[in-house]
Amino acid sequence: MLNRVHLNGLRAVETVARLGSLAGAAAELNVSVSAVSQQVKRTEKQLGQALFERTPGGLVPTEFGAVFTARLSAGFRELAQAVALANETNECTLVVSVAPAFASKWLLPRLSRHFARHPNVLLRIDASARVADLDRSDVDIAIRLGDGKWPGGRAELLLAQEVFPVCAPSIAARLKSIGDLAQTCAITDEKAMFSWDGWFETAGVEPVTFQKGARFTDPMLCLESAIAGHGVMLAWQLLTADALADGRLVAPFGIRAESGLGYWLVTSATKGESRKVRDFKAWIREEIEATMAQFRALDSAA
Amino acid sequence: MLNRVHLNGLRAVETVARLGSLAGAAAELNVSVSAVSQQVKRTEKQLGQALFERTPGGLVPTEFGAVFTARLSAGFRELAQAVALANETNECTLVVSVAPAFASKWLLPRLSRHFARHPNVLLRIDASARVADLDRSDVDIAIRLGDGKWPGGRAELLLAQEVFPVCAPSIAARLKSIGDLAQTCAITDEKAMFSWDGWFETAGVEPVTFQKGARFTDPMLCLESAIAGHGVMLAWQLLTADALADGRLVAPFGIRAESGLGYWLVTSATKGESRKVRDFKAWIREEIEATMAQFRALDSAA
DNA sequence: CGTTCACTTTAGAAAAACTGGATGGCTATG
DNA sequence: CATAGCCATCCAGTTTTTCTAAAGTGAACG
């Protein structure tokens, strides 16, 4: 049905009918009068119906044309609303792709502050495990753990990741020296991108062999297991910030090892950087700074 | 708003969303898959929003895409309805352009028979005085008085026009010979395309000088004046058929003169001839034939 | 009578849309 | 585990549409 007709022609007809003249329509459509004239004529031909009567004063809809263009106007209004909705949504909602563990343990507790500062920006957190393709999804910004190399993305380092053991205070009490780790269980994330070896090296001791411990496929589960006192976990700053701050976890030995990885903010290289994205970046840097200050305070207290 | 976006792209998006795959949309739109893919992509770029998620199984609308395409569908449905309305109207209504006098005195009384035969065709009679441009208005067919030469139109002779005097029976009673016309008033149509001279010539008599009589700019008014008994009018068959049949008028002398003009059916040379037009033509020829048979009956009765 | 206004016509230029073939990811199947 | 089949994308070249500029028409106006 609709395939037989040129949409641009319909738009021209609608605009002419609404504004009552070719000149007006041409101005609204940003084309020449001639172009509109041709579009209207072609559409009339396709419909096999004259839509306008050519009077000296300009184009006047025929009886049928009036009914027809009223319908058209309704249709185009609907389309315009859809597009307007898109632009609005576009400006007002920010989609952040982030790993579930990071979302849950660090980002979510702080989100209310972002909302307080930018009340008109609706955040949508896409915490699906799968890494989103920034160019092809509606994700505006991703927070990822890695080495900063993402093809087709603009990456900015948020925070270099330092790893260190954490455990429940009850376990920490038994750890006088690094060697005591051999008496504890290791809580292992099977998907982790780093290992204990790096930490032992930084600490300057031979690797210790742990007791058998639980293995998980998700850092969030590891963390909860550690809080429950099941063993020692090799963790990093942002994930453990809140648990360390309120004492559910402690970091024995105070030795932190560079992992070579870090948290990065990644945005599409092709999409322009919008206001909402800049605002979010600024906000998250402040939050990270606050978290790190808290860390340093704990350090000096120790 | 809507000007910034390509309508064809929106249509592609809507179709893909509705059918769930590029291939389906391509089939419906009669273009290649590749074309649809490009349209969708371009639209997403223009909106600054991803509308679909690319999964191995095909395109799935994103959260926003679902809302957006629902809106689009509504809009396009409206447009499609408008176009459908056009096609329907196109098939079902026939616009006839005709002079007011002819419409009133001959065509209208017979229209109910056209409706009885073609119940699904709605006739619209455009009886504006101005002669419609068949190519540029929604007029399907015109009935015109003339010599058959209309540039840019296909003309078919309906009936050659013969002119003859008519008057009220009361006046006719006083007219024993053509010379008696000198005692009557002539009712004159100022816009008439013929004169009494031609009739006198056919009758083989010297032109008669009438009494002063009324002059009108409309044959319909002349006719009514004649019926009212104000004088003698030079009239022609179709206009007077009904008044002669029921005796409101009579045609004294029985002499009819060729006027060189006639009633013609004119259709656009560029528009194709549709069913409804053919039907109307057939019907009107039958009606003319019936009217002329009635005429002949009157003649032989006299 | 010449001017203005509103639209049309035309031809050529510019832009958009389309095609077809190559490509690449994923799934089901032998 | 290769292989075929599906789905979509990319690319380059071509076709089609759309646009512009400029000249033209024709009614109305002063």
Image: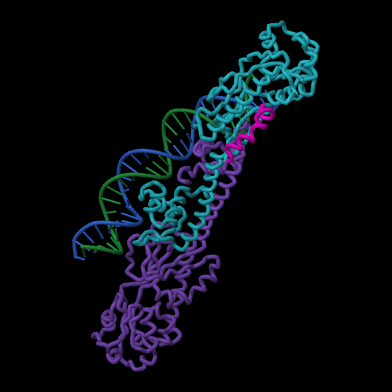
Chain colours: A purple, B cyan, C green, D blue
Quadrant in the rendering for residue B88: top right
Quadrant in the rendering for residue B259: top right
Where the C terminus of chain A falls, by quadrant? bottom left
The percent position of residue B37, horizontal first and vertical second, equals 38, 52
The percent position of residue A75, horizontal first and vertical second, equals 55, 50
- Give the farthest residue toward the bottom: A174
- Give the farthest residue toward the front: B301
Q: Can residue A23 be seen in this view?
A: no
Q: From the image, give the main secondary structure of the stretch colored magenta.
A: helix
Magenta stretch containing residue B116, yes or no?
yes
Q: Is residue A98 visible?
A: yes
Task: Determine the residue positioned at 65% across, 23% down.
Answer: B294
The percent position of residue B29, horizontal first and vertical second, equals 41, 48
Task: Determine the residue positioned at 48% across, 57% down.
Answer: B69
Quadrant in the rendering for residue B20: bottom left
Task: Tell me where the magenta segment starts and ends, as one range.
Answer: B102-119
Looking at the image, how many numbered discs can be counted on the residues?
0
The percent position of residue B185, horizontal first and vertical second, equals 79, 15
Q: Nearer the viewer, residue A248 or A53?
A: A53
Q: Which of A88 and A74 is in front in this view?
A: A74
Task: Determine the residue positioned at 41% across, 53% down.
Answer: B40
Q: In this view, does B109 lie to the left or right of A197?
A: right
Q: Which of B27 and A21 is in front in this view?
A: B27
Magenta stretch containing residue B275, yes or no?
no
Work out whether A253 lies above or below A130. below
